[in-house]
Image: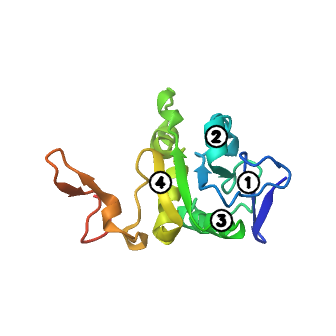
Amino acid sequence: MPFLKISSSLTFFYLIPSCPDHQNPYLDPQRPTVLLLHPRLFDSYFFTPQWRDARLARAYNLLAIDHHYHGKTKAVMDDKPYDFVMIAKDLLKALDKLGVKKCHIFGNSREFFRSFPLSGPILNSTMSSFSQVGAPIGIRMYMQRPELVESMILCGKHPPTEVCSGFLVADSSFYEASTPDGGKQGAISRSTGCMP
């Protein structure tokens, strides 16, 4: 099975389903790479429908990595909060080990809990952002190494609220959105770099 040792406390499990050799997968240098980032509580097999699409498998290196504490990835548990920046750094190290120089990122932050009738003070306060993982990690990967990211497809809602002192805007144009009249409206405050 394909594993990448990143540190003494982290070994990622990864799949390249577009590669015919599943025991010793490799990336075809003639194809662009698409990194598939799954939502929380899922693993890389979340993307099985995409793997089965022959058009994607023929045209791209499809690369899926189980994040920390997901699937077959081996990560030492600690009492620290789930750190998107650290996870993005570790995934960038994995891409370096695999020889990925550029990639497209597909980050999914599926919010499946919203459709369930959950109640109680703990569930009501935490479940709204419980499954956000793929898209926020993809954003942080871009912020750390924009030259690596050719494009991004982010599914789900915005990332969780950031602590202003730790949030750096890498490229302000990345956060702009067009208004109906054709003007620009910043989604992030330029003076503070924090979400409004």
Q: Nearer the viewer, residue 55 or 69?
A: 55
Label 1–label 4 contact, CB within 8 A? no
Badge 1, how many Cα within 10 Å: few under 14, some, many 20+?
many
x and y percentages locating residue 178 in the rendered image: 23, 51
- The answer, for residue 41, to whether it is visible in the render is no
Label 3–label 2 contact, CB within 8 A? no
At numbered mark 1, what does the secondary structure look like: helix, strand or loop? Answer: strand
Mark 2 vs 4, N-terminal side: 2
The residue indicated by pointer 1 is: 14
Q: Nearer the viewer, residue 12 or 161?
A: 12
Q: So how many labels did they put on this image?
A: 4
Identify the residue at image location x=56%, y=60%. 103
Q: Is residue 37 left or right of residue 190?
A: right
Q: Amino acid at mark 2?
A: Phe
Q: Nearer the viewer, residue 41 or 173?
A: 173
Badge 3, how many Cα within 10 Å: few under 14, some, many 20+?
some
Q: Amino acid at mark 4?
A: Met
Mark 3 vs 2, N-terminal side: 2
Mark 3 and mark 2: Cα distance apart in space: 19 Å
Q: Quadrant of the C terminus?
A: bottom left
The residue indicated by pointer 4 is: 152
Quarter holding residue 161:
bottom left
Q: Which mark is residue 95?
A: 3
Mark 1 vs 4, N-terminal side: 1
x and y percentages locating residue 57 in the rendered image: 66, 43
At numbered mark 2, what does the secondary structure look like: helix, strand or loop? Answer: helix
